[in-house]
């Protein structure tokens, strides 16, 4: 009983940022360990963010994503996204190809190595979620996931437009 009280007391002293950091840190450590075992290079946060965005657009029947769409989605300068793409392309994590609808514009998709990386990220994330469900119970884990999805949707909807591309999409 004292342990439960102490744990509750400690968590009451943590702000939300600290509480969210604990599971995120656990997941990041699991991912880093597994990706290192597979021989993937350590990636910087911006590279990981960009790979995730490309992966969300990398679906069968779709032909990649345009640089302008990545710039708008990530709220990063075009030059920064371009530099990150150059780095990821050198690592063979992504590949650029001509847009079939426009001769000059390029699209980006995960390369073979990037697809393996993305699949491993999904696998390790699912394992972490299953491990947490074992600790919390399935019902609590489903509730946590539902609340986080709802929060993410509302926070995504609140992001201010940072460039003309976003303003055009909204209005």
Image: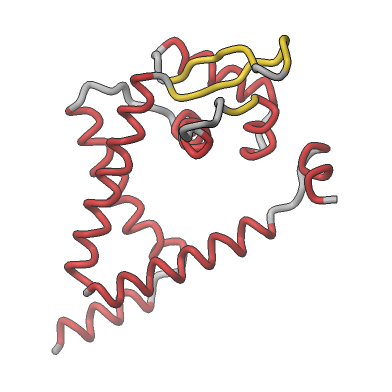
**What residue appears at the point 82 percent right and 45 percent down from the top-left corner?**
167
**What residue appears at the point 32 percent right and 50 percent down from the top-left corner?**
25
Q: Position of residue 37 (x, y in %)?
A: 17, 28
Whether residue 67 sits left or right of residue 52 in the image: it is right
**What residue appears at the point 56 percent right and 25 percent down from the top-left corner?**
63
Nearer to us in this view, 20 or 50: 50
Nearer to us in this view, 170 or 101: 101
> Which corner quadrant holds the N terminus?
bottom left
**What residue appears at the point 83 percent right and 37 percent down from the top-left corner?**
164
Q: Position of residue 146 (x, y in %)?
A: 43, 69
Nearer to us in this view, 59 or 125: 59
Query: On screen, 61 above or below 93?
Result: below
Query: On screen, 68 above or below 112?
Result: below
Q: Position of residue 79 (x, y in %)?
A: 67, 20
Specify how the rendered protein is coloured. secondary structure
How many marks on residues? Answer: 0
Instruction: Tell me the quarter of the picture where residue 66 sits.
Output: top right
Q: Position of residue 4 (x, y in %)?
A: 19, 83
Whether residue 144 sits left or right of residue 36 in the image: it is right
Q: Residue furthest bottom?
A: 1
């Amino acid at each position: 009983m004292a342990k439960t009280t102490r744990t509750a007391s400690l968590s009451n002293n943590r702000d939300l940022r600290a509480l969210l950091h604990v599971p995120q840190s656990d997941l990041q450590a699991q991912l880093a360990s597994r990706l290192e075992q597979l021989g993937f290079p350590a990636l910087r946060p911006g590279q990981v963010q960009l790979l995730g965005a490309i992966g969300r657009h990398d679906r069968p029947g779709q032909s990649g994503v345009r640089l302008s769409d990545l710039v708008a989605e990530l709220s990063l300068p075009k030059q920064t996204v371009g530099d990150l793409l150059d780095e990821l392309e050198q690592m063979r994590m992504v590949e650029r190809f001509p847009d079939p609808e426009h001769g000059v514009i390029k699209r980006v998709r995960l390369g073979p190595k990037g697809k393996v990386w993305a699949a491993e990220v999904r696998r390790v994330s699912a394992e972490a979620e299953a491990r947490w469900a074992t600790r919390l119970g399935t019902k609590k884990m489903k509730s946590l996931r539902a609340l986080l999805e709802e929060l993410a949707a509302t926070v995504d909807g609140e992001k201010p437009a940072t460039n003309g591309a976003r303003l055009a999409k909204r209005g």
